[in-house]
Image (tube, rainbow, N blue to C red):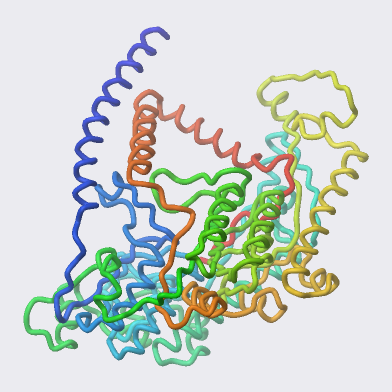
Amino acid sequence: MRFLSTLLASALGTLIALGALIAFGVLFIFAIALSSDPTPSVQPNSVLTIDVKGAIPERAVQDPFAQAFGDAPRFDLNDVNSSLRKAAADDRIDAVWLRIESSTSGWARLGDLRESIETFKESGKPVFASGTDAGMGEQAFYLASAADSLFVPPVSDFQMNGFYLPQPFFSNALERLDIEPKIVRVGDFKSAVEPFTREDLSPENRLQLQELLDTQNSVFSQAVGDGRGMDAAEIRRLAAEDPILSAEAALEAGLVDGLLYPNEIEAAIKERLNIANDLQTINVSRYARVPVSDASLTPSDEGTVAVVYAEGNIVPGKSQDNPFGGGGDSIGSQTFVEALDQARTDSNVKAIVVRVNSPGGSAAASEIMWNAMQRAGAEKPVVVSMGDFAASGGYYLAAGANSIVAQDNTITGSIGVFGLFFNARGFLENQLGVTFDAVRTSPYADIYSGIEPFRDDQQERLERSVERVYDTFLQRVADGRGMDRAEVEAIADGRVWSGRDAQEVGLVDEIGGLNLAVQRAAEAAEMGEGPYNVRILPRPKTFIEQLNESFSASVRYQITNLTTTPIERELLEQRQALERLVGTHGTVQARLPIDIRFE
């Protein structure tokens, strides 16, 4: 029976591979056709459209397969920011239209977009925003409220009812599984380990999370109030006392300008722009490829600003990317150092911006990345632009920069470290029937085995190891920020700060987005007036590399689906989840709590 199933699996795999190869050829030709698309032409009196569905990535992964089926974003944050800057000066662009189906971008990234929209509005051109029958939540509304006019469909959902931050805890589940977590940490606020040891929030963690939430509420209320011509206190009152849960309630409260069907929205825009004929539009993914010279802008001829991305969990070695697009899963120290060294040694690069969007990770990898920042900063201006997260290991590497720019609601700080260890012996013996015996040459040889409990002397040595890493972390911050060590200790302790509060305690220099960071780096390098030529690093994968990865991943995915049962696939997913859970076992981590997402 096993022979027959193996034979069938092999035959199916061969057929799938042949089918995928044919599809590969078709899509290859299709993708070549897309890549050969000439520079878009812009018609007079055009409207620049920005279609927001899900998250706008920091960097769009140009996956040819996903794009062929419409599943991957074809523009990123930089495309939107640069397009809005270009459209403000382009006489052929009369307005911008934000068409928002949903928004799951982080709050700091949305703040970047809002800033670019506000800058565009200084040109005197209007910005329109519209929702769909999918409804509009706080994130979508936060972005849409920057527009001059906002329309949503009748009878659609609308949400403005305050913010909520749930945190899961796994200690009871681990106890039932006979898995014993062992924690070594420095910092009373270093709460990344709490989900494995507690059933609720510690007082320190509750304090820092509440302060983050309060800052988020303040930033949201002020921005929405400014956009809608209302007082921030009224926005907070509505959320607390009269929550807005429908489009009709939003209209009554003055949060939107009209309840319009899709065809009526376009008619309203045409009327506002005095357009009698068909509305000419160009989407942002095409407009991003229009040269700035076409918009009567002249880039600085004083060189290039390199923007080096550090996005995802920090790991040793090379970055690990999601082959189906949507951004990197991790930033590897080797990949980051190679990219930063390219920027440092390129004579045409006059300044460097490091865009950090990371909750941290490996302390050792963070140290390697910090060292690369130091070497780059000794030769050229290096400015850090913080995204949604730049905490713990993310802040560790940022401390090596000449200056740091963050959004008000960036989550940063978390200057602390921890070691997370698991003793899975009980689970393996009592749940699975697997027993162990061993020989050793040293009483400490089994310290990272994962199947032996810690002795007191082992615990003491691990604590000393973690404390040494913490001492180094503190010194890196003190040196980078020009602070006394005692000053850093007072604001460290693993505590998480919002960008706004981080500026007050000296961890951040200026509040703003990626555009401001590029400007500050160019000013430090005396590059003159912008716009500036920008080089993105690490190098985006070539078309062939993308195609090869997409093809291989697609074939593996299909073979797995066709050769395993639903139960087997579920067990595989559970195994992978467990691997991620214990993946930090035995290493010192500089990382945020598991997840911080405002709902």
Quadrant in the rendering for residue 25:
top left
> Taking 213 as reference, is 239 left or right?
left
Is residue 53 depicted above or below 445 in this figure? below
Is residue 508 depicted above or below 36 in this figure? below
| x and y, in percent, of residue 448 in the image | 77, 34
Kindly give the residue lying farthest to the right in the view shown.
Answer: 457
| x and y, in percent, of residue 322 in the image | 45, 45
Kindly give the residue lying farthest to the left in the view shown.
Answer: 277
| x and y, in percent, of residue 474 in the image | 79, 63
Quadrant in the rendering for residue 525:
bottom right
Residue 419 visible here: yes
Is residue 9 depicted above or below 575 in this figure? above
| x and y, in percent, of residue 432 in the image | 66, 23
Q: Quadrant of the N terminus?
A: top left
* Residue at 25%, 25% in the rendered image: 18
Residue 593 visible here: no
Is residue 274 depicted above or below 595 in this figure? below
Of residue 179 and residue 474, the one placed in the foreground of this image is 474
> Taking 224 as reference, is 434 left or right?
right
